[in-house]
Amino acid sequence: KPPTRLEIGRIHFPGMPDGWIDERPRRLIRLRDEAVEPPATIGIELLELDDKLRELDEAGVAENTIVVFWSDHGYHLGEKGHWHKRTLWERSTRVPFIISAPNITKAATECSRPVSLLDIYPTLISLCGLDKREELEGNDLSALLAEPQAEWKHAAVTTWQPNNHSVRTDDWRYIRYNTGEEELYDHRTDPNEWHNLAANKELAHKKSELARHLPKPPEEITDDDGAEPGCNGTGDQK
């Protein structure tokens, strides 16, 4: 249920782990306090979405309409010293992602499996009963829509500028930069990705396992398409 206009001011961003922000310069603390003022724009968008869903009901087509909702990806508010969205970490690569498919999805269910925005097109093709297109890179999410906890062997891959990739599975995030630097985070114990485990020799097998999901580098990469850095990824995870 979207908030009423009087409730918009009660929406809040999640905070950082206790003690971390206190280590930052006071100027950054002040900037972050200003950044987390009630985000009225989010509430307004929710109200607009509610209006559109109501129109589907009134038109009598709600039970024959697939609804897909997503947005731009996340934004750092001082975490790890970053005040922007151009990273390969969890906060920056996540997006809100909701699919409602008549007779398949169930109300108030959630899925924690890592998926990509590249999966939208293959999923819509499947839900609409159209022929499968083998050239598409994404995966059909129909199985997860029917059973959110179904087994899922795919990873979500995000790319930021040439040859900087992040691989996200249920429990791990692996990052490899074009410099050869690596990052590895265990989300079972470190959901905020504070502790880079890439140098741990005992986890070398895990890095190799995750690296199999990395895109193969093209023969030639150009960065002259005018896209804003951070917006040319191969996909964003939910």
Image: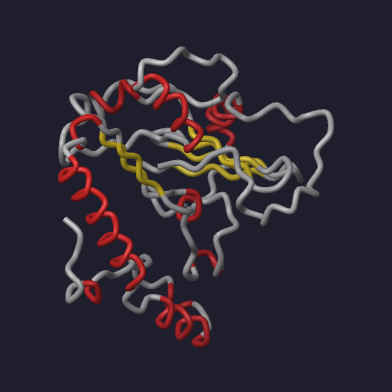
In this rendering, the answer to whether 177 lies above or below 75 is above
**Residue 159 vertical position relative to residue 206 in the rendered view, above or below:** below
Task: Return the residue nearer the eye: 1 or 211.
Answer: 1
Image quarter hosting the C terminus: top left
Q: How is the image coloured?
A: secondary structure
7 to the left or right of 130 = left
Question: What residue lies at 53% left-to-right and 33% top-to-bottom?
Answer: 203
Question: Measured from the top left, where is residue 104 in percent x and y?
Answer: 21, 25
Q: Is residue 219 above or below residue 194?
A: above
Left or right of residue 222: residue 175: left
* Residue 84 position in % (x across, y down): 56, 65
Residue displayed at 33% across by 67% down: 13
Percent x, y of residue 164: 68, 43
At 23% from the left and 29% from the top, the residue drawn is 64
Residue at position x 46%, y 12% in the image: 131
Q: Is residue 116 above or below residue 213?
A: below
Q: How many marks?
A: 0
Given the current orientation, which residue lies at the most extreme front position?
Answer: 59
Q: Nearer the viewer, residue 191 or 221?
A: 221
Q: Quadrant of residue 112?
A: top left
Figure quadrant of the N terminus: bottom left
The x, y position of residue 139, in whole percent, is 46, 24
